[in-house]
Image (spheres, rainbow, N blue to C red):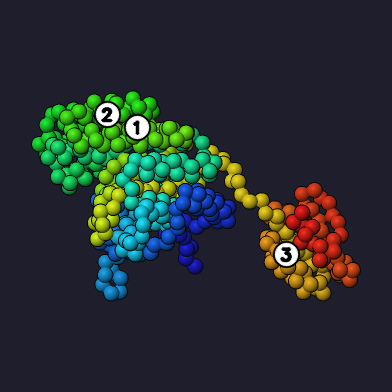
Amino acid sequence: MPEFKTVRGMRDFLPEETRMMKYVEKTARSVAESFGYEEIMTPLVESYELLAAKAGEEVRLRMFAFKDLGGRMVALRPEFTPSIARIVATALKNEPKPLRLFCLGSLYRYDEPQRGRYREFWQSDFELIGSAKPEADAELLILTSGLMERVGLKGCTFRVGHVGVLRGVLTQEGLDDKLQNGVLQLMDKKQYEDALGLVKTSGASEKCLTILRSLVELKGSDVSKAGETMKKCVDGYEKAVVAVENLSEILRLVVESGCEINISVEAGFARGLEYYTGMIFEAYVPELDVALSGGGRYDKLVELFGGEPTAAVGVANGVDRIMLAMQEQRVIMKEDAGKKIMIIPVGDETRAEALKISRALKNAGMVVEFEIMGRRIGKALEDADRRKIDYAVIVGKKELEEGKVSLKDLKKREQTTVKIEQLAETLKS
């Protein structure tokens, strides 16, 4: 018999891992809803043209793309943002702005599997559509920080930059969008010398190269000081100066909101996706060298898909990576402590009544397991302990004749007799 394994880059989630994933998803949903975001669901398969439009060369090369039986070129979604932009340009085009939307689900990229990187991965995606104001960008930073805090992560750092600073310099130097995309993709991979080499061969000035080198080295946690230094650095490049002012205003709002975010301003920071137009950011914890979240402003994507010119900003949070960070930091999940109950029938003649009791407790909103292995009471109680059951309801013939059952508190090792009609109330109290 062949030994079947998961496809490379795909994983099984066993109960404990699934429980953690659902916890992160539940928390992400709760945080999003507390900010007024509404959940939508998008198809797993989209047209290749839609997904490839502004994804960036790196993502385009790694999409799971194929022809369907109708000969159409389609792909498994590598991210949510194009799908959301499509929906905003079509089904939601007449809805009042702003739109606050979020998605949860699986995505697919043919990356080389490694720690924190898989070919099938999960994200929670928050998108704020319709506002070009700096408070919209600030909201996404605060929202993402809130998610990290709510799942219990410590020491989170936000790496923040602005695509408009780099693009402002490169545009004034005469580099077209295609060349700019190539430069930014190299900078995203931290291949700065290659990026500068590409700028140099394009005919850019020495002043431009000097400024780009300075921007790459410009990093700081003092938000105000970093903004002032960046502005001096790009003096003379009008669009870049405007971008610095925009970034400074966003970060000022975040700081003055009272949200305690550890921010590292990085002037040479770039992300591989081509659709970003403004502020960009990623979130990290000290234990991992991969970003837990990443996002930014994309003011031209909705228009690209046939919609009206629409400002937008969004963030994708890696559910898998957040889980990995939680495991590294040994985070204890703050789950709802619902009581778990096991029903143990004693003898075949009590099974039907035990099932009836089990059904009644489930209808009362409790988590109930039924002992279906035919074990003796001692072995059944051992199994209940192993399963971390809180209470065992022992249904014996003698007790049933009196309309009662035995209720055992497995934590306190105490046992009492309870009337069946009072059992649910007793367990709840």
Q: Name the residue under label 2.
A: 230
Q: Residue drawn 73% across and 59% down? A: 341
The crowd level at tag 2 (other Cα within 10 Å; few <14, some 14-19, many 20+) is: many
Distance of mark 3 from mark 1, alpha carbons? Answer: 55 Å
Seen from the viewer's position, the closer of residues 154 and 58 is 154
Q: In which quarter of the image is residue 289?
A: top left
Q: Where residue 140 appears, x then y in whole percent?
A: 40, 44
Number of other residues with Cα within 10 Å of mark 3, as a class: few under 14, some 14 to 19, many 20 or more: some
Disc 1 is placed on an element classified as strand
Mark 1 — residue? 265
The residue at 45%/56% (across/down) is 38
Disc 3 element: helix
Hey, what amino acid is under mark 3?
A: Leu
Along the polypeptide, which appears first: circle 2 or circle 1?
2
Badge 3 is on which residue? 361
Residue 134 in sight = yes
